[in-house]
Image (cartoon, rainbow, N blue to C red):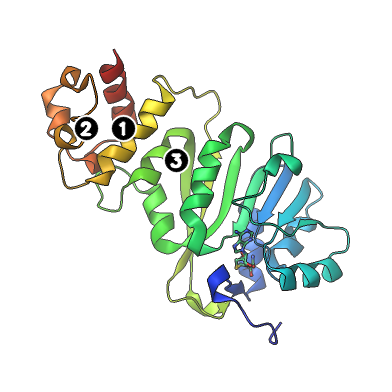
Amino acid sequence: MENVKAKKYLGQHFLTDKNIAEKIANSLQYQGNVLEIGPGMGILTDFILQNPKLHVAAIEIDHESVDYLHERFPNLTLYQEDFLKFDIHQIFNEPFAIIGNFPYNISAPILFKLLEMRDIIPELTGMFQKEVAQRICTKAGSKEYGILSVLLQTFFHCDYLFMVHEGVFNPPPKVKSAVIRLTRKENFRLSCNEKLYFQVVKAAFNQRRKTMRNSLKSFAGIEKVDEITLQKRPEQLSFDEFITLVQKIES
Ligand code: SAH
């Protein structure tokens, strides 16, 4: 592993601490199909493969890692593909959880893909850059609160689990990392138009210093929203309040 030259443009920071890898693997609560994104040299893969309750597949973009993984785990179902471009239905047609020490350069697209495919993804557990992990889990009112916080908290229980120091990676990243678990809310139904909901949340945070009135003035029906809400800034609204707002717009 010392000889492997990590590729920065692929966000390669290989975890070197087996205890932490095991802790991440144990943080996954779902039992059944699991897809690992970016297994790299397989430190996490090794632990999830040992769990008899999991049916593991992995998707890794880097051919050198893939060659290595094929040798190390001959029975692993492994796809050399870009997670963002690959049609995941080719791997699983039924529900599956996602796990990984994710490539941080594509954190947001991974999370938007999770939102898009949430009907068949009951859980995502894994490591992101610490700031991203905090932003996802933080409640309304903090300045880190943003689009992904609202949208993910709408559909998932978001738990910040633990922080990981940069020294346990090869090469060490410039930032700290943290492990989170997103568990889909069962029996939750969005009680407003979904497309409009996503549009409103995005428009509100596109100009996060402005009031809701200012950011949302192009939405027909905005005058039906109460004055107190319209004077707020987007980071002051919980996902429930965003839902109520959209219900009023479309009423
Ligand atoms: N899980 C490993 C590696 C983490 S580094 C460990 O903990 O050590 C992130 C990994 O994601 C790298 O192996 C990188 O090659 C891979 N990767 C980067 N972009 C990817 C993409 N679009 N699709 C799939 N894998 C990707």
Q: Position of residue 208 (x, y in %)?
A: 22, 46
Q: Position of residue 160 (x, y in %)?
A: 46, 52
Q: Which mark is residue 200?
A: 1
Q: Quadrant of residue 10?
A: bottom right
Depth check, front residue: 189 or 179: 189
How far separated are the C-alphas under marks 1 and 3? 15 Å
Mark 3 crowdedness (10 Å alpha carbons): few <14, some 14-19, many ≥20: many
Q: Which mark is residue 22?
A: none
Mark 2 crowdedness (10 Å alpha carbons): few <14, some 14-19, many ≥20: many
Depth check, front residue: 15 or 210: 210
Element on which disc 1 rests: helix
Q: Nearer the viewer, mark 1 or mark 3?
A: 1
Q: Is residue 60 left or right of residue 251?
A: right
Residue placed under numbered mark 2 in the picture: 216
Residue positioned 28% across, 38% down in the render: 203
Q: Amino acid at mark 1?
A: Val
Element on which disc 3 rests: helix
Depth check, front residue: 139 or 173: 173
Q: Amino acid at mark 2?
A: Leu
Element on which disc 2 rests: loop
